[in-house]
Image (spheres, coloured by chain):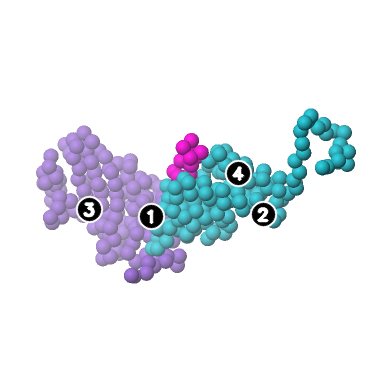
Chain colours: A cyan, B purple
Amino acid sequence: MVVIEKIPGAELIRKVPGGGFFLTTSESFLKWGKASSLWPMTFGLACCAIEMIATGAPRFDIDRFGAGVFRASPRQCDVMVVAGTICVKMNDCIRRLYAQMPEPKYVIALGNCAISGGIFYYDTYSVTKGTESLGIKVDVFIPGCPPRPENLLFGLMKLQEKIRREKDAAR
Amino acid sequence: MRPDEISAAIRAKFPQVKEEAGTNYIIVPKESILEVSEYIKNPPLSFDNLHCITGIDRKEKIEVIYTLYSIGEHYGVTIKINLTSEDLNIASVSAIWKSANWLEREVYDLFGVIFSGHPDLRRILNPYDWQGYPLRKDYSNPQLIAKPRL
């Protein structure tokens, strides 16, 4: 048990009658908060974006994982879901959107095209071969063409797991 | 009107126009594209809708293909123009059909056909600083990864 008088500023704290204390490190508390309120960006490139929209809709309900607030501005986002084929003409646009996101920021590559170019890998002049070839570090890769909404939810849970295991929470 | 009747009507008006063997496509010499377009846009044929302009690279020549439709009369026609690789200039029909503006930009972007008289001839699908014309058979670029033969 913690003796309440030893906490600095203890006179400001009032114990709820019958209540208890919950002890944690500020580090893991911060990580829990980060993982539980990921705000994705409203940003889709091709057919995988339709799956992302379906994941946001009530049937699959990405809101259950605290990631349902799709923001229309990159400056309010934590996660960029690269959903679809990256055309050469979109390269600068994606780099700029990623640069505009505040830290901490995470990237999910949704679908084969965002991973490696997918079916457009060979003999295609207009498609960039994956998100990492743009110099953007990807946290979670979700394969599929397109992946099912469950796959995106699984990838999101993997990202939350990754955030909770981070060494430096104040990244 | 049936496709052969349309073809016959245009060939009766312009003797330099030919019909492709086995089809009802109309082959127009590139010098007469403007007068043929002007004629078929207006009644009696009234092809008021230009669906599509596309190209085919046949190595020794580039074919430019115009697909037209008449919304009022419910019939269509396809016009082909053969361009030699040395001279890829052709008159623009964007003054006759407004939709030709972007369609011609697309053919310019992908095949390098120069439409003279076009109001704004620049690339439309590829970035403005793109080098080369991607749908030509001899196109290649260092980023292309050739598909392995199985």
Of all residues shown, which one is farthest toward the top?
A: A17
User: Which quadrant holds residue B47?
Assistant: top left
Mark 4 vs mark 1: tell me if same chain: no
Decide which of B82, A120 is in the foreground and name it. A120
- What residue is at 21 percent from the left and 50 percent from the top? B79
Task: Give the extent of the magenta segment.
Answer: A49-61
A168 up-or-down from B48: above or below:
below
Looking at the rendered structure, the kind of residue marked 1 is Asp
Distance in Å between CA atoms under marks 2 and 4: 15 Å
CA distance separating discs 3 and 1: 19 Å
Q: Position of residue B139 (x, y in %)?
A: 37, 64
Q: CA distance from mark 3 to mark 4?
A: 55 Å
Q: Which residue is mark 2?
A: A166
Tell me the crowding category of disc 1: few under 14, some 14 to 19, or many 20 or more residues within 10 angstroms, Cα based. Answer: many
For label 1, the residue is B109
Q: Quadrant of residue B131?
A: bottom left
Residue B120, how many percent across, how many down?
A: 40, 47
Q: Is residue B2 magenta?
A: no
Chain letter for mark 1: B
Tell me the distance, in whole angstroms, between the alpha carbons under discs 3 and 2. 63 Å
Our reading of the magenta stretch's main secondary structure is: helix
Residue identified by numbered label 3: B80
Query: Marks 3 and 1: same chain?
Result: yes
CB contact under 8 Å: marks 4 and 1:
no
Q: How many callouts does the rendering have?
A: 4
Q: Do the CB atoms of the residues marked 1 and 2 lie less than 8 Å apart?
A: no
Q: Quadrant of the N terminus of chain B?
A: top left
Three-letter residue code for mark 3: Lys
Q: Chain of mark 3?
A: B
